[in-house]
Image: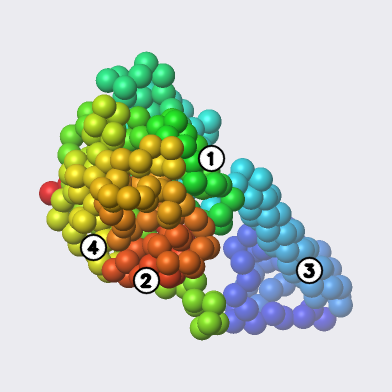
Amino acid sequence: MFKAIPWSWQLPLAFIICCSEFYIPTHGGWVNDLHQNETTLDVIEAMIRRQTLINSLDGMKKSVEQLNFRSYIEENDERDPEMFDIRIDALPEKCQILGTPRSCAEATACTQRSGYYHIKIDQFSNASFLVQCDAHTEGGGWTVIQRRQDGSVDFYRPWDDYKAGFGEVEGEFFIGLDRLHALTNYQGVQELIIQMEHLNETNGNKVTSAQAKYDSFAIGAECDKYNLKRIGKYSGTAGDSLQIHIGCKFSTKDQDNDKHASKNCAESYLGGWWYNSCHWSNLNGHYGDVNHGKGINWRTWMGHTVSLKYVQMMIRRHRC
């Protein structure tokens, strides 16, 4: 006697094809063409187990491939796309033939990805320099010019360090006043966005964030002591703590260019900044310092006795 398998079984087409040499479908069921004995179901069950094993192995293969991809990402320090997700040495081939871009907007136009790129400003230098580009925030095209995040880099530095730039673009750094002058004077009107975070340790380490955005931003040349020559209209959630510094010259511990009559604001507040007499903002202050005015301060958001946990400053060509 043969065993009948109802048509209500929805066996995969691949299974029907591979087993057609053994079983012939009829209106009433499946007829064993070679043997009419109890081995029919054993063969079918074996084939089902085989197919299940194949599916399982395929799933394992995909899992391993995904694991390898994640490992590759981790090994290459790739992070959330909103931070960065490409390096200059990993550009797609189609983007490598375009030459050295002049800005982050040009650099990311082809890749559409945040990351590290070399850009070159002809009026500034024949050599390119490495920058981090943000292709995601408010439409992208941003060049990161400063970052504070962990206190690993000392920002209480002399004039020449601020002129040339210091730190590592992957971590805490300042891009340098010479480069900042070139970026804000030779590539059209630039806008500035400042992203800030505060860690409230008395409230379960809750992180709050705010930002300040200005629709124009430019600094002068070294002969003008890199003065803050233009700050446009403010928008954002942090309040405006920068307008009061407009027109002020940059000051460091060894170059007192501020407007205070009797003291060096950079020495008093442990940073380098466009100090007035002295400040409403001090984004290059001493990391973690809660003494009045000495930390990373933004007066209109957290005042002078809270040192911000994270700050990032970015610029791009103004968009209407």
Question: Quadrant location of residue 113?
Answer: top left
Marks 4 and 1, how far apart in space? 28 Å
**Which of the marked residues, 2 or 1, is nearer the chain's N terminus?**
1
Marks 2 and 1, how far apart in space? 27 Å
Which residue type carries mark 4?
Asp
* 305 shown above or below 83: below
Residue at 44% from the left image edge and 42% from the top image edge = 253
**Which of the marked residues, 1 or 3, is nearer the chain's N terminus?**
3
**Number of residues whose C-alpha sits closer than 10 Å to that of mark 4, classed few (under 14), some (14–19) or many (20 or more):** many
Question: Quick one: which residue is furthest to the top in this view?
Answer: 126
Q: Quick one: quadrant of the N terminus?
A: bottom right
Which residue type carries mark 1?
Glu
Mark 2 and mark 3 in contact (Cβ < 8 Å)?
no
Residue holding disc 2 = 302
Residue 36 in sight: no
Residue at 37% from the left image edge and 71% from the top image edge = 302
Regarding mark 1 in the picture, which secondary structure is present there?
loop
Marks 4 and 3, how far apart in space? 69 Å
Residue holding disc 3 = 49
Residue 258 in sight: yes
Which residue type carries mark 2?
Met
127 or 158, which is in the foreground?
Answer: 158
* 136 shown above or below 51: above
- In the rendered image, residue 261, in percent from the top left (x then y), is placed at 28, 50
**Number of residues whose C-alpha sits closer than 10 Å to that of mark 2, classed few (under 14), some (14–19) or many (20 or more):** some
Marks 1 and 3, how far apart in space? 56 Å
Marks 2 and 4, how far apart in space? 12 Å
Residue holding disc 1 = 168
Residue holding disc 4 = 240
**Which of the marked residues, 4 or 1, is nearer the chain's N terminus?**
1
**Which of the marked residues, 3 or 2, is nearer the chain's N terminus?**
3
